[in-house]
Amino acid sequence: MPSIAAIRSSPTSIDVSSPQKRRLRSNSALLDEQICKSPPLKASSSPLKSKSPRRCVEDSPNRSRTDVDKGVVSDNLTKMRKSPKKKLLDVFLDKPIWNPTDSEQLSAVKEALHVSTAPSTIVCREDEQKRIVDFCKQSVEQEKAGSLYICGCPGTGKSLSMENVKGSLAVWAKETGGQLPEILAVNCTSLSSTSEIFNKILGKIQPHKKLNARSSSLRQLQQLGSQNQQTPGMKMMLVIADELDYLITKDRVVLHDLFMLTTLPFSRIILIGIANAIDLADRFLPKLQSLNCKPMVVSFRAYSMDQIIIILKQRLMALPYTVFQPQALELCARKVAAASGDMRKALGICRGAIEMLETELRDSTCTSTFSSMVRVDHMAIALSRAYKSPIVDTIQSLPQHQQIVLCSTVKLFRRGKKDTTIGELNKSYIDVCKSTLIPPVGIMELSCMCRVLGDQGILKLGQSRDDKLRRVTLQIDEADIIFALQGIRFFRNCLQ
Ligand SMILES: Nc1ncnc2c1ncn2[C@@H]1O[C@H](COP(=O)(O)OP(=O)(O)OP(=O)(O)O)[C@@H](O)[C@H]1O
Ligand SMILES: [Mg+2]
C-alpha cells in the first residue's frame, strides 16, 4: 500500500479499470458564505446501521427543504472572501470549549459527525444538484424519456445529493403545479437477482396488475414503451438506480436493457443511474451511443481539502461549543483530500479522533480545558489507523533516537534545505534532545544511526572521508515523517 505522500503525488497509480477506484479532483468553487448562514443541524434521531459498506438509497435521511430550491446554487460560488482555513479559526475560537466528559455533549458531537445524520444544507454540491434537477424538470415538462448517469468516487455525496434532488422536485411540482413523476429508488446491491429491477419498475407502473408469468417483466416493459398506450394524466416515471456498479460487474445485459428502455418511442422512463465508474456509456453501453441516446453525465469530483473543511465546519456549526482544534480539522481534511476525497472517511476519522481524546481523558487526571479539545495528535492517530502505510509503520516502530534524527532532519529541511551534512544534522539533533530533556548520543553513534536509516531506505548518505561532511538527504516524503511522529506526544512540540 502506498504511503500517504505517495498517494498524493501519484494519482495515476489508481487502478483506472476498476469502477470503485476512479477519482476526479474537485476544483469547484467554495461556498463559505452559505455555511455561515446555514440553519442548525437537524440530527436524525436514530443513526442507521450499514447493511454493507455501501448504504441503501432508501436509508438516507430525508430533508424537508432543499438547497436547490432555496436558490443558493450559483450565487454563492463567487462570494468567498476568506480561505476556509482562516475562517475555520474565526468560527471555532469564539465558542466555549466543550466538555467531553458530559455524555450529552459527547453524543451530540458524535451524532453531528455521523454519516447517517443528514446535514441541514448540502454544501459543495449545489452545481451538481442543479444539473440533475434541471434534467428531471425538463424531462417531465417535455414528457420525454431519457437517462442521466451520475459518477464519482465513494463518499463524494452522490446518494446524499439524490435525496435532496427528490425533495427539490417535490417542492418544484408543488410550487408550479407541475406533475411530480412517480419515483422509484432502487439500490442495486439489494436486488435478489439483477432482473428483479424490471419487476420493480413494472410493479410501480402497474401497481394493481398481477405479474404476467408467461412474459418477463422486461418484455412487458419493452412492449409498453413500444406501443402508444398513453392515457391522460399518465405520470412520467423517475427510476433512481443507485450502486449501479453491481450491475456493471454482475450483469451487463441487464444494465444495457435497463438503459435501452429509455430509448423506446413511447417510453415514459427517466432513468438516473449512480455508480463509481466514470465511462459507463463509452465502455458498457455502445449501442446507446450508436443510437445517439448516450446518457447525460454528472460527475462528482473527489472533495478537495477546502471543501472537506467547509463540510466539517457546516456539520459542527450548530454545536454551541468548540470540539476540535482548527489545526486538527485541517490535518484531517488535508490527508483525506490527498488520499481519496471521501467525506465518509473524513467523518469517520473525526469520530475516531474524539475517541482518542476520550481514551486519554479516561487514562489521565489532568482536567485543563486545553486537554478537552480534540488536538492534532489525536487526529494524527485516528488518521494513521485509517490509512496504515508501511512507511508510517516503519517510522513509528523505529527506536526513539532514530525518530529524533528524523525529526531533526525535518526541522532542518523546513528552512528550505534539500540536503545537509552529518555535522549539521548532529547540531539539530542536539537541539531537539535538549528541548526534550533527552541525553544525546555522540556523533559516532549518530553517524551509525544514519547508516541504519540509510539501509532502510529512509535516508541517503553521500561519500566523504570525514564522517561529519557526509551529505544526508531524505529518501521519503517529509509529510510521512510528520504524519508518523505527530501522533507521538513526545514529538508534538518538536514538529510544531
Ligand atoms: N456535501 C456534503 N455535506 C455534508 N455531508 C456530506 C456531503 N457529502 C458527503 N457527506 C457525508 O458523507 C456520506 C457519504 O456520502 P454519500 O453516501 O452521498 O456518498 P456516495 O457518493 O453515494 O458514495 P458511494 O459511491 O460509496 O455510494 C453522507 O452520508 C454524508 O454524511
Ligand atoms: Mg452512494
Image (cartoon, rainbow, N blue to C red):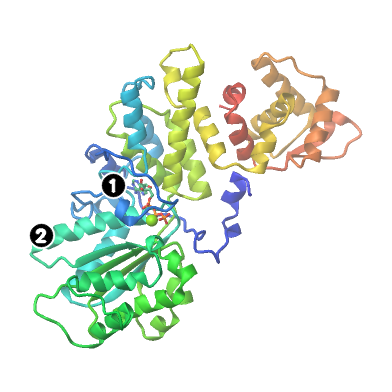
Residue 336 position in % (x across, y down):
49, 44
Q: Is residue 417 visible in the rendered structure shown here?
A: no
Relative placement, left or right, of 359 versus 91 is right
Task: Please report the residue visible at 27 percent of the width from the left and 33 percent of the height from the top.
Answer: 318
Residue 351 position in % (x across, y down):
43, 35
Q: Is residue 204 visible in the rendered structure shown here?
A: yes
Question: How many other residues sit within 10 Å of disc 1, few (<14), some (14-19) or many (≥20)?
Answer: some
Q: Please give the residue where the numbered disc 1 appears in the rendered image.
A: 79
Task: Please report the residue visible at 54 percent of the width from the left and 33 percent of the height from the top.
Answer: 380
Amino acid type, label 2: Lys
Question: How far apart are the two marked residues, 2 and 1, measured between alpha carbons?
Answer: 30 Å
Seen in the picture, residue 153 relative to 255 is either above or below; the reply is above
The answer to which image quadrant residue 216 occupies is bottom left
* Residue 174, numbered circle: 2
* Residue 196, numbered circle: none
Q: Nearer the viewer, residue 306 or 370?
A: 370
Question: How many other residues sit within 10 Å of disc 2, few (<14), some (14-19) or many (≥20)?
Answer: few
Task: Please report the residue visible at 44 percent of the width from the left and 40 percent of the height from the top.
Answer: 348
Outermost right residue: 465
Q: Nearer the viewer, mark 2 or mark 1?
A: 2
Amino acid type, label 1: Lys
Residue 353 position in % (x across, y down):
47, 31
Outermost front residue: 213
Dot 2 lies on which element?
Answer: helix
Q: Quadrant of the C terminus?
A: top right
Relative placement, left or right, of 45 versus 382 is left
Q: Nearer the viewer, residue 381 or 432?
A: 381
2 or 1: tag closer to the N-terminus: 1
Task: Please report the residue visible at 46 percent of the width from the left and 29 percent of the height from the top.
Answer: 355
Dot 1 lies on which element?
Answer: loop
